[in-house]
Amino acid sequence: MSKPTVVDAITEELAYRVAAGVYPPGALLPSVRQLAVEFSASTPTANSALGRLAALGFAEARRGLGYVVRDIRMYGGIDTWRYLLRFAHRVPDQAAKLFADIIDVDHLLVMDAVRTFVDAPERYDITPIIHAADRMELLVSDSNSALTDIMAAELHLLRCAFAALGKPGVLSLFNTIGEVLVTVPEAAQAFYEPLEPAGHVLLARKFQEIRELDTDVGLPDLSVVELLMREYHNQVIAAFRDLITKKAIAAE
């Protein structure tokens, strides 16, 4: 991983101030010269940081004024939220709520896929899913594998599932969510706290077994699956909040 630059540091600090309400929506951000003085940086560096902040959705350039803070709760896009989660421990309540919203959407997408698959498993070619599960299992069996790498492998497995089910719109939305989650170390920790990685592999193999059934006997009760999945996701949300809250306290 490359070392953060001065532009990175200024951008992150300004983004934090916007997220924390230090700079409220509609407020004018400090000028390039003011930022250059505050951060002991050159004016081109400060200008680059403001430009990046705008590109991330935290501000917008106004001709003749400078950069004005956007209401990220109303207009924040995926880049805004991905960046905010980089400093989740500095705005733990806000980050925890955002994470909970993301997991709720993830829950809906996954359950929709499960219902579609169980309704007619014989219709779908799950060969790519099996290969993805094999790759994930190899990572899980290696004690040196990072949780973020395992999570990336599981996200790929789910992408293969959405693709196999012929759900391009859902896959697009899931990819957006996955891009956010895979960049947050605490997200991977939270995902595997209620159920260790090996358990996730076993669940993937269960759907492989369903595909190979000749009858409806042995198909899961979807109401039970829904309850179990909801409980798991609730535990993931609670674990994430706990992790970033502890990190926030440690940083004080």
Image (tube, rainbow, N blue to C red):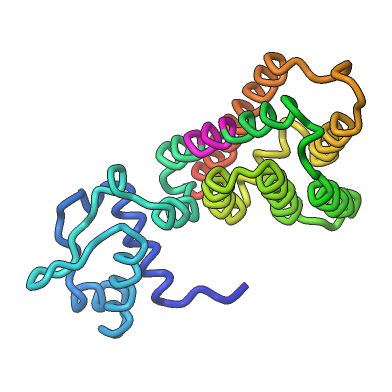
Q: In the displayed structure, does residue 141 sit left or right of residue 104?
A: right
Q: Which quadrant is the N terminus positioned in?
A: bottom right
Magenta region includes residue 172? no
Front-most of residues 234 and 163: 163
Q: Image height check: is 171 above or below 5?
A: above
The x and y percentages for residue 113 are 65, 34
Report x, y in % for residue 114. Answer: 69, 30
Residue ID at (34%, 66%):
55
Instruction: Where is residue 241? Give x, y as percent.
Output: 54, 35
Q: Nearer the viewer, residue 71 or 8?
A: 71
On the picture, is 66 further left or further right than 19? left
Q: Main secondary structure of the magenta part?
A: helix
State which region is magenta. Answer: 100-108
- The part of the image, by quadrant, that contains residue 91 is top left
Q: Is residue 220 left or right of residue 33?
A: right
Give the residue displayed 15% in from the left and 60% down from the top: 28
Above or below for 99 versus 75: above
Q: Which residue lies most toward the left here?
A: 64
Snapshot quadrant of residue 64 = bottom left
Q: Which residue is at 67% across, 30% downward?
A: 116
Q: Is residue 46 left or right of residue 196?
A: left
Residue at 28%, 71% in the rendered image = 50
